Image (cartoon, helix red, strand yellow):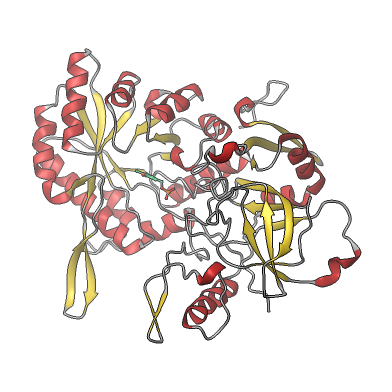
Amino acid sequence: MPLYLRPRIDPPLASLLRAQTFLHSLVDALGSPLNVLLPEVVAENAARFRAVYRRHHLSGRVYFAHKANRSSALVRRLAAEDGAAVGVDVASLEELRHALGSGFTGDRIMATGPKDPEFLWLAARVGATVNLDSPGELEQLAGLVRGHGLGRVAVLVRLSGFESAAQGGTGTRLLARRSRFGTPVREAGALLSALERHADAVELTGVAYHLDTTGVEEKARALEQCVLFMDECRARGLAPRAVDIGGGFGVGYLADAGEWERWTTALSEAVLGVRPPLTWRGHGYGLRNEGGTVRGTAALYPAHRPTAGPGYLDELLSLPAPVLGRPAATLLLEHLHDLYIEPGRALVDQSGLSLARVLDVRPAGEDPGQYLVRLGMNAGDMSLEEHGVLMDPVLLARGEPAANDEEGPVGVYLTGNLCLEADLITRRLVHLPRLPRAGDLLAFANTAGYAMDFHAHHAQRQPLARTVAVEREGDSWRWCPDEDYWPITPSGGTTA
Ligand SMILES: *Cc1c(COP(=O)(O)O)cnc(C)c1O
């Protein structure tokens, strides 16, 4: 039985994937690999997050975490949304410049991550909110504001090191997740003193966290600790208004929970040697066999998720806070706090795909049923594997099926265009409904979050993927280069 891991594909993307002739002609003209984006989908995703705010009667803004994708089309499309509802989170000087040039005004921009002085200066100059990563950054910002006679800058303080309960052999312990970023909560008192000292240069407008976890309880605990910390700020005469709960709402990549369970079970069995390897050279994705027992943790994204994105936010807001007992949304409402979120991956869910031309198909070696399929792309061009996201591509045949296409499901390793043993698009055996032929396309769905350009590089002078934005127009599709997209129709109307 083929171990499929078929992608979840919602209507707009599904309809694009049915436009096979269109996609083939795009790759014929623009080369392989090629990234295709649906800017309308990010606007729809932002609206879904806004609907969760409404359901919980919350105000505040959705900030798109730009780092998930370099595209101009996506950022410009979001810039066209209601300014009070949608902003952008930038994590570098160039992302900030890009957001400004895409139509975001400074007051809709949040600068996050560690910042160099140029980034801080421009953020302060244009009136962006600075999400402070450390006390040192606060000193530097205050110095810049005074030295350059800038206006008072709105700042959030990013906290980290929240304690959460962990069940262990010795009962419940408090564990603090370590992070390179933010100020540990236990050092936040000193930060408040510094904020008071620099009150002429900065105004504390909120408290932030961003946790690299899928655990909703841990996030609920952090949210509550932020609300309690806001009380402390107010008691000291500061007046923060917003709780920024960062990103990490996640994406459900796979259509079928059963396929995901079967595959992960099969991986453990293969690691134990009770079934043939599922992966190139027996790679275990972090699992290993220690004397007949599977050890280690699989470094895999939970690719099938019953709740993700807006649904995950809804769940988090509905969860009772561990100390105060009331749902997180109620805590925010009672305190009249605004809610900020910074979704990256979840905001670009279903908004793009990556195409690769099949260049060569050959037997994989001893096993007669397995093949190596070499693609016109490399592991940097389509980095789902790098992010531990396991998902099958969709085969888009060129022209009519040939007579021998009846063969049925086949296992293939997808290899890249670099002269490098390690350049595998997937380290696992991918099952496809039939063997691809040279000239076919493989479409990797849902790559807009971190997978289509995050790791792209110039090794061997192989071509970087071009990116195009597409839009449905009646029965056909209109496209333009990503950099030429603006959120207006060719006749000058608005798409928003
Ligand atoms: C990366 C990042 C995000 C976005 O995370 P996703 O998992 O893509 O939603 C948001 N905020 C900060 C501070 C980040 O570093």
From the top left corner, tell me how far across and down residue 402 is, in percent.
Answer: 89, 61
Residue 398: image x %, image y %? Answer: 82, 51
- The single residue placed furthest to the top in the displayed view is 149
Q: Nearer the viewer, residue 72 or 222?
A: 72
- Which residue is at a point 55% across and 35% down the rendered structure image? 71
User: Which quarter of the rendered picture does the C terminus lie within?
Assistant: top right
Determine the residue positioned at 57% across, 73% down. Answer: 278
Residues 361 and 61: in front is 361
Q: Nearer the viewer, residue 456 or 64?
A: 456
Q: Name which quarter of the figure residue 95 lies in.
A: top left
Vertical placement of 377 versus 126: above or below?
Answer: below
Residue 28, horizontal then vertical, whole percent: 77, 39
The N terminus sits in image quarter: bottom right
Residue 425 falls in image quadrant: bottom right
Residue located 24% across and 58% down the image:
177
Q: Is residue 326 left or right of residue 239?
A: right
Q: Give the side of residue 405 with respect to residue 384, left or right.
A: right
Q: Is residue 319 visible?
A: no
